[in-house]
Image (spheres, rainbow, N blue to C red):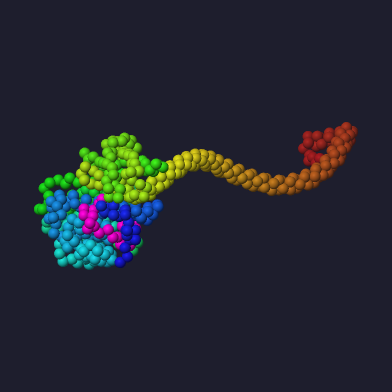
Amino acid sequence: MKTNIFVHDNPLVDVLIQTLARSPETFQPEIMAIDEMYSYVFNQLEDKNSHRALTYYYTMGRAILDTVKQLVDWHFGGFEAVDSFLDFACGYGRFTRFLIQEIPPEKIWVSDIYKKAVKFQSEYFGVQGIYSTSLPEDYQVDRSFDVIMASSFFSHMPATTFEGWMQKIYDLKSRRGLLLFSVLDMELLDPHIRRSETGLVFSPDSESKSLDKQEYGTTWVTEEYVRRILDQISDGNAEITRIPKGLNRYQDLYAVSDRSVASPNPLAFYHHPEGKIDYCYIQPNGEVRLSGWAIDFNPGVTLEIQLWSDSRLIGVYPCSEERPDIVAHYQQPDFLLSGWSCVLSSDQISPQDILIIKIVSSKGLQAIIEGDRLVAISSRRNWDIQLSTTRQQLTQTQAQLTATVDQYQSQIDQYQSQIAQYQSQIAQYQSQIDQYKQQIAQYQSQIDQYQARKFETEAEIGRYQTEYLAQKSEWEHLQSQMQIMSHQLDTLENRIQAMESSKFWKLRTKWFKLKRVLGLPVNE
């Protein structure tokens, strides 16, 4: 099986073993080339630095052992009382290489769905292997275990197999045994992602490059969800202890045992310290100036910085310098005196020497924050400072750009608001224009009607004028006849008057009168 080439003949690995291993002489440092725990860290690093990846890999393995040891000591009184240990979803042995220095390999079983991982650990560490399966119902093991550790397994299980696997490994726990497993608490979920009422949220995404994402993704759960499942599968007999962020200050850690064998003492659990190097500068005279910070989330714990060079302790320094920036970042007033600094002479270390910078707590827990050749640390730190400065400048530029964009956006919003007002006014004007057009159309229709009536009226006027002229002509004719008749009447009247004034007419009148007197017929 191919192993990681960066481990071979690497003085850094030798120094890390001396610093981290309980028994450096028997420690097994080999890492498989396909170990995803190493490759994931390596690929996450911007500089793809193998030394940094190795430092994190071994440090994390030791940190998991420290965590498990606290719980084993609390429940059993020590590893000596453990007869069987199952590392479930063991991977390629990041933790096992430290565990075999606490428990004989023949008392350790490792199990994983990666057969190459189980084979590697069985052959290299001498532990016993069990091939795992995709489905819990297919996982058949004919024995129980005093301690079962499932690190970063349930943080990947979907709802379809979460409870089944919990039931399976709980049933593998011996009556006096202890089940340890870690989960991602729902508080770690992005606040923009909708929570599930069931208490479990699953996303088909993980660091694995080969497993089915629907079977092995990323899972977040609530404490209520975990406790409800454990109560169901144990018929209410499980004693459950939750340690928030108990694994690597990230995943929640649960310790489960039967209530009848649970430890009567409360668990005094301690997290590992954390820190970072801020400054590493090698002066031309060989003098080295270092500074950084370190914190511990456990109350009442003190810290010191240890510098190791080629397995030699070359300096111990307290955390006694004020760091208000750390207080502001973590919102912890107790972190004010978290800074440290030192100066190393050229007699203590040379640029090509391996330097290990380690934080050690008063509870015996440690964290390595740097491990590499001094010149590499200095170069990387200076590069990080330049990168940080560039990022700050970029952040400032982005902030300015954002402010400018916001200002322009505000102006655009104002212009758009004005445009909307203008568009509203235009719409109103258009509505008025449409009304005017309708009125004009009505007026045009009326004009057309009036025009038609005008034509009709003019025609009637023409007829009236014709009739008038005809009647006028007839009237003038009648008037002419009337004048003639009037003249004739005047002539007749003159004749009558002349006749009446004549003697004959007078005698005639008297004759008629006489006939009337005499009663004779009168014919005038």
* Identity of the residue drawn at 10% across and 53% down: 261
Residue at 41 percent of width and 42 percent of height: 284
Instruction: Give the x, y percent position of residue 29.
Output: 27, 58
**In which quadrant is the C terminus drawn?**
top right
Front residue of 309 and 256: 309
Q: Is residue 404 left or right of residue 232?
A: right
Q: Position of residue 336 (x, y in %)?
A: 30, 36
Instruction: State the quadrant of the N terminus.
Output: bottom left
Q: Is residue 224 above or below residue 86?
A: above
Q: Is residue 453 visible?
A: no
Residue 21 visible, this angle: yes
Quick one: 347 or 198, which is closer to the camera? 347
Q: Quadrant of residue 6?
A: bottom left
Q: Residue furthest top?
A: 501
- Residue 174, picture quadrant: bottom left
Q: x, y percentage for residue 48?
A: 39, 54
**Front one among 121 and 399:** 121
Give the x, y percent position of residue 83: 13, 59
Q: Residue at 23% across / 65% down in the picture?
A: 122
Q: Is residue 83 left or right of residue 308?
A: left
Q: Nearer the viewer, residue 45 or 281?
A: 281
Left or right: residue 133 versus residue 328 is left
* Magenta residue span: 19-40
